Image (spheres, rainbow, N blue to C red):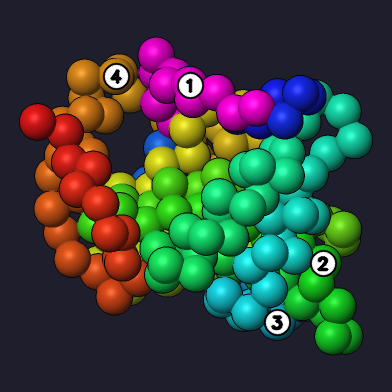
Amino acid sequence: MGNDDGSVDWYRPVRRALLPITGIHVSRSLEKSIRRNEFEIRFDTAFENVVRSCIRQSDNWINEAIVRAYIQIQQEGWGHSSESWREGALVGGVYGVCIGGCFCAESMFHKQSNASKVALWALVEKCRELGFTLFDVQMMSPHLTSLGAFEVSDSDYDEQFAQASKAMTPWDRCPYDLSIP
């Protein structure tokens, strides 16, 4: 996480939040947005814009060092974004990192109602189609709970990550061995 002084610290949650790879919980309003094709979904067409749009005015963990790191990760081929567009404008999105068959979602934003949720729904669907087995959203929040997120212990996460990281998916270009011994 980025600090106000420009430095970066790495944190590991004691309990990890995951979304079911079988799909997120879709509320009635979200279902309407999806069914009506309210947003055009694109993948990887505006990665840097998605990352920068996730920067909040306060209580923010994304600083310029984090932005640069994720841009490099995307350029190396293992960072991806799911984007909601309306009338040619980026109105929502989510970005993250692929390691084998694990997608680690980092942050999301919206400028219109349901835009980030539709992008997240599309991303989970895409990951399942590509053979991912684990969808990591890191830390639980009421918003993620409403979408069907659940928590696992650190040791359970390590086991699931170890299995998922061995898989090969079309989006995985991670140049490092991040498997857990």
Disc 4 + disc 2, Cβ < 8 Å: no
Q: Mark 1: which amino acid?
A: Tyr
Q: Mark 3: which amino acid?
A: Glu
Q: CA distance from mark 2 to mark 3?
A: 10 Å
Decide which of 156, 47 is in the foreground and name it. Answer: 47
Q: Which mark is residue 58?
A: none
Query: Crowding near pointer 4: few (<14 within 10 Å), some, many (20+)?
Result: some
**Dot 1 lies on which element?**
loop
* The C terminus - image quarter: top left
The residue at the far top in this view is 14
**Dot 4 lies on which element?**
helix
Q: Which residues are magenta?
A: 7-17
Q: CA distance from mark 1 to mark 2?
A: 29 Å
Which residue position is annotated with label 3? 40
Which residue position is annotated with label 1? 11
Membership of 53 in magenta stretch = no
Decide which of 11, 87 is in the foreground and name it. Answer: 11
82 horizontally vs 55: left or right = left
* The N terminus - image quarter: top right
Residue 123 seen anywhere in this rendered image of the structure: no
Which residue position is annotated with label 2? 91
Query: Crowding near pointer 3: few (<14 within 10 Å), some, many (20+)?
Result: some
- Residue 21 sits above or below residue 156 on the image: below
Q: Mark 4: which amino acid?
A: Asp
